Image (spheres, rainbow, N blue to C red):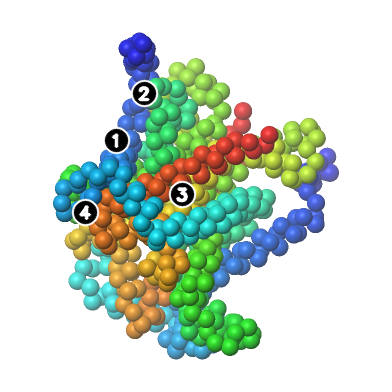
Amino acid sequence: MFRKKIARTWPEMKKNKHAYVLMAPYFIIFCTFTVIPVLLSFFLSFTNFNLLETPRFIGWQNYARLFVQDDIFMIALKNTLLFAAITGPISYIACFMFAWLINELPPKLRALLTLVLYAPSISGNTYLIWTLLFAGDSYGYANSFLMKWGFTMEPIQWLQDSRYVLMILILVQLWLSLGTSFLAFIAGLQNVDRTMYEAGSIDGIRNRWQELWFITLPAMRPQLMFGAVIQIASAFSVAEISIYLIGFPSVDYAAHTIVTHLVDYGSIRFEMGYASAIATVLFTIMLTVNLVTQKLLGKVGE
Amino acid sequence: MKLVLKMPKRLNRSWGVDLLLFVLLGGVACFMALPLVFTISNAFKPIDEIFTFPPKLFVRNPTLKNFTDLVGIFSDSWVPFSRYVFNTFFIAIFGTVGHVILASAAAYPLAKLRFPGKKLLFNIVVLSLMFTVYVTQVPNYMIISYLGLINTYWAILLPAFGMTLGLYLMKQFMEQIPDALLEAGKIDGASEYRIYWQIVMPIVRPAWLTLIIFSLQNLWTNGSVTSHKYIYSEQLKTVDYVFGQIANGGLVRTGPVAAVTLLMMIVPITVFIVTQSSIIQTMSTSGLKE
């Protein structure tokens, strides 16, 4: 049976030689720098690898430790889920809404607004500006504004107070989030065939919302899928802005995320096996969310 | 006839909702622009205005001193500044061109051809997007050093060629191309390579311009992170690495740091403006109609 399948596959592969030739250069590089490291890390998650000794196989021990003994991981898990549940959907919808609104504007204005909305995420580490805006003394813009208008009498330690840090993180992430998918949506919207709208209005589409649901969204399904994957990846793997904005580790671990936990074990304690286990858990969560999202997106326009 | 011409391109619009939506859009745009305005204005503030209380958003007596100070800092470094600039441009341009060509060549079969293993390959690509880079850093370092690429441009370029995002984006765009168009090419006797290069590539131009922006941005802003890890000799480092060094200089250098932040922002934004205008141009003639 298996042999038969191979016997059928081989001529099929030979017939499609050109497909493999076109893909080869990319996939050789992709495997070397992405697939192999990921597989290696999977394997390492079952070992006690610490970069110095040769890795020793310890089975599920890392995972058991993660879920049973590691209280801080639970905080990180809770923060990450909360963070992702807020920023993920909001920024995904915002990306689409703004792309959609901008698309109807005259070209010059559209270009300008695209730039303004996209600029935060394109300009590298400009999010560090927020440290100035939320500076803890009265020189900070947020504090000086609140004090001037009499909301508070003394400066608030925005970035050192465990009540505010996660909120600020969410705000900054939302500010940054009109990025990759936003741009992909804009390009996708411009690809939608204009004649479909005329056909739609003849077929009885009455308002812009019906137009959106029955014509625009289904036509953009490839971009919507793309956007969802990107948004999920970025909502769950937040770390950099937490580290640079709030500090590492954050006060009371209030802005600790799964990835900062991973950075802790991976680049500070050098427990690579444990860090790999954290990565694998995160991967599983993201994968599950992704599958559910893809299912939901499949229903668009029905 | 005149009446038909005057009709708006898009039907089914009401003024009230239009107004509401655009007020919303305007509000968000202001919020998004605030820190950028702040960066620009800070770069031109004299030192006493940076530390003024209460802080002001806009600059009052603009000065170029922050930028001239920067020149002073650069002239102290023992590798000429132009070398860093060359490295940055070399890596950004070469890395982007390589990535766009390799990724779209791989995306075309995945989107439009049928062959054994197609589904598997694509699933691997999507899965790999779900794995965080932090943990693959160590295996990556091991591979790069095993290949003998440490301290060469290749340590940055090769991984950039194989970025996942580009392939995925390209594949999604190519899926929208009508099959009839490709079949027409095949009937006219074009080989798959020719169809890819002369039919598919021109059609997905909006997508590869988007891809160019991503790739350039990635190489420009993450360049320092990677060059930190794989590149040790000062001659091969990039501009943003140097800028990062200045930014770490602390309070005394607050002025130059503001100037540096502005400079760091300007490059990707300029690239974006240039690419964006050509996206809009191609859009009107994209010819994606069945």
Instruction: Identify the mark nearer the N-term, 3 or 1.
Output: 1
Which residue is label 4 attached to?
A50
Is residue A282 left or right of A31 when viewed as pictured?
Answer: right
* In-image side of B109 versus A63 (left or right): right
Given contact means CB atoms under 8 Å apart, are the residues at marks 3 and 2 in contact?
no
B36, A3: nearer the viewer? A3
Q: To which residue does mark 3 refer? A: A233
Tell which circle, 2 or 1, labels the residue nearer the N-terminal end: 2
The alpha-carbon separation of the residues under discs 3 and 2 comes to 32 Å
Location of mark 1 (residue): A28
Q: Earlier in the sequence, mark 4 or mark 1?
A: 1
Q: Amino acid at mark 3?
A: Ala
Going by the numbered disc 2, the residue's amino acid type is His
> Dot 2 corresponds to which residue?
A18
Observer able to see residue A107: no
Q: Residue A41 vs residue A105: left or right?
A: left
Is residue B108 among what the camera can see? yes
In this view, the mark in front (3 or 2): 3
Residue at mark 2 to residue at mark 1: CA–CA distance: 16 Å
Query: First in sequence: mark 4 or mark 3?
Result: 4
Q: CA distance from mark 3 to mark 1?
A: 24 Å
Residue B60 x/y as whole percent:
53, 85
> On the rendered image, what quadrant is the C terminus of chain B found in?
top right
Q: Chain of mark 4?
A: A
SS for callout 1? helix
Placement of B56 over or under A278, stated as above or below: below
